[in-house]
Image: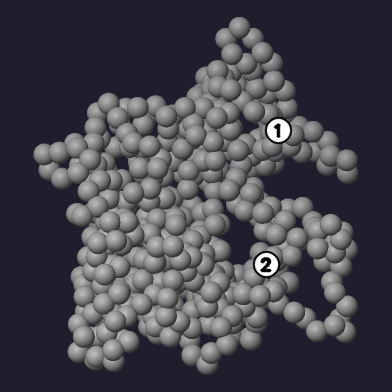
């Protein structure tokens, strides 16, 4: 959510927050789309187990959550019953987003229009570990050989976990990520991962500062951990005796004692889930009060494309996601994520002056004054065409990191792209000579460019789709997985 490198501006705002006792805004706009009816999932797991579910609160209504519990998390049959109930909720929610489609025109004239769903699901969890835990549950369930909906649930949980890693995607989001992208607090990043303490800084109770409210939110009795891990004292003093009581009742075959033990465990798990459930909707309400950035619509359209593609893949009988990516697939995915991160940061800078100011401190954007301009400058292309190439000279005091063939764009003129041709140092900063290479019009109909004395800001232009090519799997060196195995040999999946 935040830039990969912490900027001087973020550090300064954290200092201001610590001094004032109140959170400070880092953004003027919200850069993730929020649907009208998200599916909130607050999961808990058994301590010491990688994927043994203890329970979860799930639903779309803040006043009516569905509470699912596993009285003995190590019991495989009880685990499966939990996954089956969760599958019905999640899959019904996904199916409800497949009722309406819209026609999308192709960028190529020779391709017919395509259809995509007009809406898409959105999963919200309290924090990043909860999102990763849902991905782990997807890995656990998507290869199960059962005739019910559990394997399909696993495929969808894996899909959401994968999209959660994609910068700018809004299909699966963590509340702490959304909040820390918008506000700086006076506490550490580790403390910001605590949803109760984070919200205490952002919207403290009346009569309290954020720092005072955050200290009160440290109490695990009033504000249990947001999951998936539970509080150790709760595990030792409440959960462990309740689970042991369930085991004794099950061994004795006492149905009355068993029902009593199940109710006790359910009550204990609810005491850990419901405070976080209420915090989730409080944070969501606070985020909805922020205006949505213009580029959100474009990114949400890409999310709907991904959702439509996955629905079609499943409907056509496509296989589940592999347990491990091939070396080529892993490299291609990493390159895609890197391009998406750069594009997401550039789009935020175009939409939000706070982000633009932050990138200026990192050298990825710059601002200054136009001291010279050549609006009628032209060049002759290799084919002999006369091209309009206006030139600007901008004086700046910002640090600028120059990269080969990097293009820049201004929020005031988002359709005009410029490239730095020369850098000249002088006593009052440096002079940047820029050529406008797109959006400048034609020699007969030139588009306006910045005037002399005008203050301008430029940030890196969002990267276009596409990227480097990778070798085919059969051409991959043996050091990176090698050619595929002999086709006559039976294909063996690694052990789960």
In percent of width and height, residue 439 lies at 63, 42
- The part of the image, by quadrant, that contains residue 322 is bottom right
Marks 2/1: CA–CA distance: 34 Å
Crowd around label 2: few <14 · some 14–19 · many ≥20 (10 Å): few
Vertical placement of residue 114 versus 299, above or below: below
Front-most of residues 209 and 396: 209
Vertical placement of residue 341 versus 149, above or below: above
Per the rendering, the mark at residue 158 is: none
In percent of width and height, residue 114 lies at 61, 76
Which residue has dot 2 on it?
324
- The residue under the point 25% across, 80% down is 262
- The part of the image, by quadrant, that contains residue 364 is top right
Q: Is residue 329 visible in this depiction of the protein?
A: yes
Front-most of residues 482 and 359: 482
In percent of width and height, residue 335 lies at 69, 52
Q: Is residue 286 visible in this depiction of the protein?
A: no
Residue furthest left in the image: 207
Q: Secondary structure at mark 1?
A: loop
Front-most of residues 183 and 145: 145
Vertical placement of residue 293 versus 420, above or below: below
Q: Secondary structure at mark 2?
A: loop
Which residue has dot 1 on it?
403
- The residue under the point 71% across, 77% down is 493
In percent of width and height, residue 2 lies at 48, 43
Which image quadrant: the C terminus? bottom right
**Colour theme:** one colour
Front-most of residues 392 and 92: 92
Residue furthest top in the image: 427
């Amino acid at each position: 959510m935040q830039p990969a490198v912490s900027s001087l501006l973020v550090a300064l705002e954290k200092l201001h927050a610590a001094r004032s006792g109140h959170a400070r805004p880092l953004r003027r706009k919200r850069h993730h789309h929020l649907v009208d009816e998200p599916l909130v999932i607050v999961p808990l797991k058994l301590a010491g187990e990688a994927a043994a579910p203890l329970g979860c609160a799930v639903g779309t209504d803040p006043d009516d959550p569905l509470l699912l519990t596993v009285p003995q998390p190590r019991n495989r049959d009880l685990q499966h019953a939990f996954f089956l109930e969760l599958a019905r909720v999640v899959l019904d929610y996904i199916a409800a987003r497949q009722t309406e489609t819209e026609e999308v025109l192709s960028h190529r004239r020779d391709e017919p229009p395509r259809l995509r769903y007009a809406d898409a699901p959105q999963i919200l969890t309290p924090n990043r570990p909860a999102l990763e835990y849902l991905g782990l549950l997807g890995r656990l369930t998507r290869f199960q050989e059962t005739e019910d909906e559990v394997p399909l649930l696993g495929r969808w949980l894996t899909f959401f976990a994968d999209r959660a890693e994609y910068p700018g995607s809004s299909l699966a989001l963590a509340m702490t990520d959304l909040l820390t992208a918008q506000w700086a607090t006076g506490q550490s990043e580790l403390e910001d991962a605590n949803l109760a303490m984070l919200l205490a800084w952002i919207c403290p109770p009346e009569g309290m500062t954020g720092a005072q409210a955050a200290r009160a939110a440290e109490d695990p009795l009033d504000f249990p951990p947001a999951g998936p891990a539970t509080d150790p004292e709760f595990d030792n003093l409440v959960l462990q005796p309740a689970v042991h009581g369930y085991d004794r009742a099950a061994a004795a075959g006492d149905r009355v004692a068993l029902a009593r033990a199940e109710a006790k465990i359910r009550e204990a798990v609810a005491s850990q889930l419901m405070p976080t459930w209420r915090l989730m909707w409080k944070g969501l309400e606070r985020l909805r009060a922020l205006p949505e950035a213009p580029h959100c619509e474009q990114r949400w359209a890409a999310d709907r494309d991904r959702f439509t593609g996955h629905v079609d893949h499943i409907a056509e009988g496509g296989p589940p996601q592999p347990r491990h990516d091939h070396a080529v697939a892993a490299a291609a995915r990493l390159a895609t994520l890197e391009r998406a991160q750069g594009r997401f940061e550039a789009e935020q800078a175009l939409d939000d002056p706070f982000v633009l100011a932050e990138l200026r401190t990192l050298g990825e954007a710059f601002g200054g004054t136009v001291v010279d301009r050549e609006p009628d400058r032209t060049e002759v292309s290799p084919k002999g065409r006369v091209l309009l190439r206006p030139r600007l000279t901008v004086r700046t005091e910002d640090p600028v990191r120059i990269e080969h063939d990097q293009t820049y764009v201004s929020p005031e003129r988002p359709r005009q792209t410029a490239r730095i041709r020369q850098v000249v140092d002088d006593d009052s900063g440096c002079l940047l000579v820029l050529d406008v290479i797109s959006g400048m019009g034609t020699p007969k109909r030139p588009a306006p460019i910045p005037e002399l004395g005008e203050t301008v800001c430029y940030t890196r232009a969002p990267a276009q789709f596409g990227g480097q090519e990778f070798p085919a799997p059969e051409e991959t060196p043996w050091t990176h997985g090698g050619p595929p195995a002999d086709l006559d040999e039976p294909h063996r999946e690694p052990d789960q």
